[in-house]
Amino acid sequence: IYGNAYVIPNHSPSPCGDSFTVDNRPWFAKFPNYLKDNTHGKLVHSYFTTIQNGFKKIEPNLSQGAKKMWGVKNAGGSSKISEVLSFEVLHKYFNARLLKTELDVEYSNKNGSITDYVCDIHGTKVGVSVTRAMKYKGVFTSKDAKRLLTKKLNGVLKSSKNSLENWHKQILHIWSANLDNTKALVDEYYRIPTDVTSNTDVFILTTMGSNFIYESPPRDDKSVI
């Protein structure tokens, strides 16, 4: 993704053991510096491909941080696998170190907006919110993309104000079920006011052969948010 144009890259997979690959993109080396800049948000994209499909086959190869996330309760919902794999990707490719799981994060208002986990990436403390972009019934449209991005990005801003963790920035990690969904997200992202995106880096992973990430439907059957 360059500017507001979506470019389908050549795959350059970088494997993690026998579990999955994420395409090694030019922005990888710059990502830690993106996180240090809490005045400008970035949109980045890559591909996630499972070598052995199914979470049970990936689970034995998880890092200690991901295993901890898998073994503890979260705040509810159906997205635990996507949250665990989100951390695993950040750990394997950006040396993320888990600081707090979802229910360990401290807030001024326990009933306010929350984030999914907190980690350290190259010395920068970040909150990470995870979501999935797909539709169980029908086609994921630009309207769905706008709805998801607007809701999640505003939620990130609220959770940052609500948090007592003093993180430097947040990542909105979006699992996208296919390229059409990703293109819709990219197009709508650049229509969102900068004051909503300024302190959040949006990390989209288009999944290839990884349907298990989306197998648990959310309570909202319009789209995964």
Image: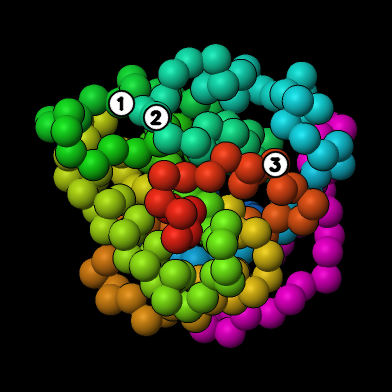
Q: Which mark is residue 210?
A: none
Q: Main secondary structure of the magenta part?
A: loop
Mark 2 vs 3: CB contact within 8 A: no
Give the camera-side residue of 93 and 153: 153
Q: Amino acid at mark 1?
A: Val
Q: Is residue 203 visible?
A: no
Q: Is residue 157 magenta?
A: no
C-alpha separation, residue under disc 2 versus residue under disc 3? 18 Å
Q: Quadrant of the N terminus?
A: bottom right
Per the rendered image, the range of residues in magenta is 1-27
Q: Which mark is residue 105?
A: 1
Q: Is residue 28 left or right of residue 159?
A: right
Q: Residue furthest left?
A: 108
Q: Is residue 80 left or right of residue 74?
A: right
Can you identify the residue that label 3 sits on? 212
Q: Is residue 14 magenta?
A: yes
Q: Which mark is residue 76?
A: 2
Q: Nearer the viewer, mark 1 or mark 2?
A: 2
- The residue shown at (26%, 58%) is 154
Q: Amino acid at mark 3?
A: Phe
Q: Amino acid at mark 2?
A: Gly
- The residue shown at (44%, 18%) is 73
Quadrant in the rendering for residue 115: top left
Residue 142: horizontal and vertical position, in percent?
47, 78
